Amino acid sequence: MRRFLVAGNWKMNTNRASGQELAAALAVDSPAAEDGVEVLVCPPYPYLTTISDKVAGSGVQVGAQDVYFEASGAFTGEVAVDMLRDVGCDYVIIGHSERRHVMGETDETINRKVKAAIAGGLKVILCVGELLSDREGGHTESVLDAQMTGGLADISEQDGKDLVIAYEPVWAIGTGVTASPEQAESAHEHLRNWIANRYNSTFSDNVRILYGGSVKPDNAETLMGQTNVDGALVGGASLKPDLFVPIIDAARKLATA
Ligand code: PEP
C-alpha cells in the first residue's frame, strides 16, 4: 500500500518570517500522529534550519530543492548532502524542470546527485517530464524513458527503496494549465511499467509517483484519485496554507476512502 505524499516546493519564494508563518500553519494542520498522508515542505536553502525547527515534533517533514554531488570542498555556491541532513532534511528534490531547463542540468549530473543523495541517506524525489513540443511531437514516453534511464543509471533496487518519482509535464508547471487526469494517469502508468521492466513489479508497486503541474484545491482530488498517482508536488499553491491544506486534505480523503 503506497502512502500519499504531498510535497510543497517553495522554489525561490518566502522570506524568514513568511516561511515560518507558513510552516507553523502546516505544523498545526499535520500533527505527528497524522494518518495516511506524508507532508513535506521544501524551502530555499537559507531557511532550512529555521523551518526544520518550526515543524519539529509535527508531522511535517523538510526537504531541499537541490543538492550537489560532491561531499565537500572548493565548490562555491553548492550545498552537500551531509549539510542538508545536518539541518534536518529528510528529502531532496532532484532534476526539477527548472534545474534542467533554466540551469541546464543534464541527466548525467542528475544521476550523480541521485547517487550522492541516496548514499548520504536522503530520500530522493526525482522529477521527470516532457516539454510541450515533446508532447505535441508524440515523444512524451521516449523523453520520460530517457530521463528515467539517465537519472537512475546504476541505482539498484536496494538503493531505490525510498525513491519517489515526480511526473511534472513542463508545460503544466506554473502555467495554470494542468494535465488532464487521463494524461497524468497515462504517464504515471508508463513510468510504473518502466520501473517494473527495469527492476521488478514488487519494486514498482512500492515506488510512489507524484504528479506536479498547477495542482490546486479544485483539481487535486481528481488527479490524486488516479490509480498510479500517489500524491502531488505542488509549487505555487504550496505557498498559501488556504490552498495547500485543502490539497493535503484531498489526499487524506482518498487515503481513507
Ligand atoms: C513545481 O514547481 O514543481 C510545480 C509543480 O509548480 P506549480 O504547482 O506552480 O505548477
Image: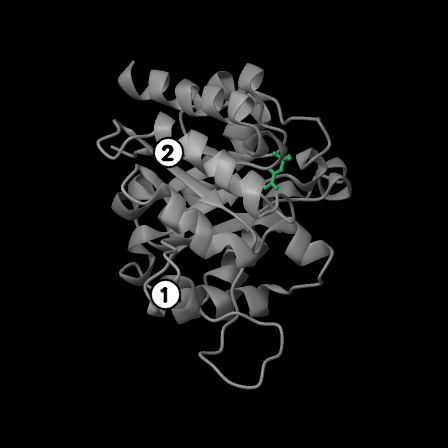
* Residue on which disc 1 sits: 86
Q: CA distance from mark 1 to mark 2?
A: 20 Å
Residue flagged by tag 1: what amino acid is it?
Answer: Asp
Q: Earlier in the sequence, mark 1 or mark 2?
A: 2
From the viewer's perspective, is residue 93 above or below residue 13?
Answer: below
Write down which quadrant ligand 1 falls in.
Answer: top right
Looking at the image, which is closer to me, 87 or 69? 87
Residue positioned 39% across, 23% down in the render = 251
Other-residue count near label 1 (Cα within 10 Å), few / some / many at <14 / 14–19 / ≥20 = few
Tell me where residue 237 appears, x and y as whole percent. 59, 29
Residue 4 place in picture, x, y as percent: 35, 32
Left/right of residue 162 with respect to residue 244 in the rendered view: left
Q: How is the image coloured?
A: one colour
Residue sitting at the far bottom: 74
Give the label on residue 180, or none.
Answer: none
Q: Secondary structure at mark 2?
A: helix
In the image: residue 254, left or right of residue 8: left
Residue ID at (55%, 22%): 243
Circle 2 residues within 10 Å: few <14, some 14–19, many ≥20: many
In this picture, residue 104 sits left or right of residue 35: right
Name the residue beneath numbered marker 2. Answer: 27
Q: Quadrant of residue 58?
A: top left
Question: Considering the image in quadrants, where does the C terminus appear?
Answer: top left
Q: Is residue 94 visible?
A: no
In the image, residue 31 lies at what x, y percent? 28, 31
> Which amino acid, by three-letter code, is at mark 2?
Ala
